[in-house]
């Protein structure tokens, strides 16, 4: 009897959960507990870490999980590593639902960098208006260049004072092109810092930057462990043994 664990937290994971619920497949949806009010899912849901590799392995055994689907974000590298190790330890089949990275289109002005710390060095010395679309966990390095006017975007309001003065937009996405264009024009944004998340939920800012001719400091994805990886919900359903209508 199949019982799947979805490591979720992304728009794609929500789409998968809806398909799995429609198919009547026994599954549990898991959030890391990063946001105060994560979106409801049509499946039994757990929230919070497992307690490392051993905690996840114990969970898999205790809950008699037969399949694990890593549908976390491309930057959730630790969760993905833990899933590979825990599934190897318990002999549980694992697959990743991972969307392709965004690629440059004609007109894009990207400066690609390996990690967020390199982003600060790319910013100019002269004061600029910078949109940091990288959430809250990795903004500390920007305190090194307080001369800029920063706009941050968080899912939840900040609980602690920021390390530098900045204007915070509280919004969980997905975002629209018109909304991003209006925000960037109104704030006179001249630089954007983004992670190469891929997917549609946060792509609008990249398209808006191109239309406005703005430079994007694009943080490349961290290396992820090798594991079976697909890009569509239909392929996950087939992996679980469900026939899906062709071209789904
Ligand atoms: C808790 C689940 C949906 C979900 C929306 C997608 C789309 C918006 C792209 C910008 C970039 C950012 C951030 C972002 C994206 C979607 C999707 C995606 C980027 C939720 C969610 C959880 C999280 C965690 C949160 C992180 C933060 C990152 C904001 C839910 C809304 C910036 C990543 O406050 C915090 O601590 C937030 C932490 C990890 C990265 C960071 O370091 O701050 N996501 N995002 C998941 C959990 O607890 O397991 O609350 O409902 C999911 C979404 N995030 O259904 O449409 O591509 O999936 N999320 C980045 O790309 O850099 C926003 O603002 O343009
Ligand atoms: P991470 O750094 O890879 O993981 C850190 C720890 O958080 C993991 O070791 C695990 O704790 C716990 N964790 C992460 N995802 C979990 C999940 N879905 N269910 C249960 N525990 C989870 O993860 P992250 O980058 O902070 O991302 C956290 C969540 O936000 C994930 O669900 C991810 O899909 C979502 N998200 C992240 C980003 C991003 O930019 N990173 C963007 C959008 C959405 P234990 O070791 O204790 O098990």
Image (cartoon, rainbow, N blue to C red):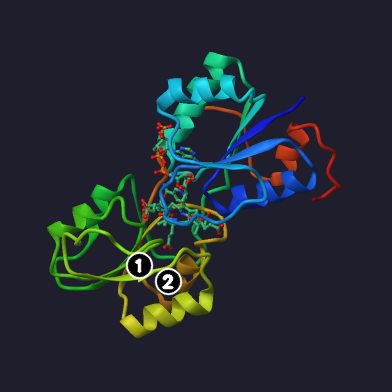
Report if the CB atoms under discs 2 and 1 are less than 8 Å apart.
yes
Name the foreground residue: 103 vs 185. 185
Element at badge 1? loop
Total marks drawn?
2
Element at badge 2? helix
Q: Quadrant of residue 151?
A: bottom left
Name the foreground residue: 71 vs 182. 71
Residue 144 is situated, as x and y percent measured from the top left of the image, at 13, 57
Residue 61 is situated, as x and y percent measured from the top left of the image, at 58, 19
Residue 42 is situated, as x and y percent measured from the top left of the image, at 67, 50
Left or right: 232 in relation to 151: right
Q: Is residue 225 visible?
A: no
Label 2 sits on residue: 209
Left or right: 164 in relation to 220: left
Label 1 sits on residue: 215
Residue 158 is situated, as x and y percent measured from the top left of the image, at 29, 62
Q: Quadrant of residue 30?
A: top right
Q: Residue at x 44, y 41 (%)?
A: 76
Q: Is residue 137 above or below residue 97?
A: below
The quarter of the rendered structure image containing the N terminus is: top right
The label on residue 17 is none
How many other residues sit within 10 Å of disc 1, few (<14), some (14-19) or many (≥20)?
some
Q: Residue at x 44, y 82 (%)?
A: 182
Q: Residue at x 40, y 75 (%)?
A: 213
């Amino acid at each position: 009897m199949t019982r799947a664990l979805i490591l979720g937290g992304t728009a794609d994971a929500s789409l998968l959960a809806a398909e799995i619920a429609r198919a009547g497949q026994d599954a549990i949806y898991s959030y890391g507990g990063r946001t105060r009010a994560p979106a409801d899912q049509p499946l039994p849901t757990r929230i919070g870490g497992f307690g490392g590799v051993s905690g996840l392995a114990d969970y898999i055994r205790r809950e008699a999980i037969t399949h694990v689907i890593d549908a976390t974000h491309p930057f959730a590298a630790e969760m993905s590593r833990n899933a590979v190790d825990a599934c190897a330890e318990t002999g549980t089949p694992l697959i990743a639902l991972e969307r392709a990275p965004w690629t440059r289109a004609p007109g894009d002005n990207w400066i690609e960098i390996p990690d967020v710390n390199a982003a600060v060095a790319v910013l100019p010395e002269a004061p600029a208006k910078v949109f940091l679309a990288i959430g809250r966990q990795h903004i500390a390095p920007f305190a090194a260049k307080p001369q800029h006017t920063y706009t941050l975007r968080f899912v939840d309001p900040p609980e602690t004072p920021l390390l530098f003065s900045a204007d915070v937009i509280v919004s969980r996405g997905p975002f629209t092109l018109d909304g991003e264009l209006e925000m960037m024009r109104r704030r006179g944004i001249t630089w954007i810092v983004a992670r190469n998340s891929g997917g549609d939920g946060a792509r609008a800012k990249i398209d808006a930057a191109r239309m406005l001719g703005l430079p994007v400091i694009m943080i490349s994805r961290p290396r992820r462990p090798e594991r079976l990886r697909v890009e569509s919900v239909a392929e996950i359903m087939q992996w679980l043994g469900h026939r899906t209508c062709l071209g789904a």
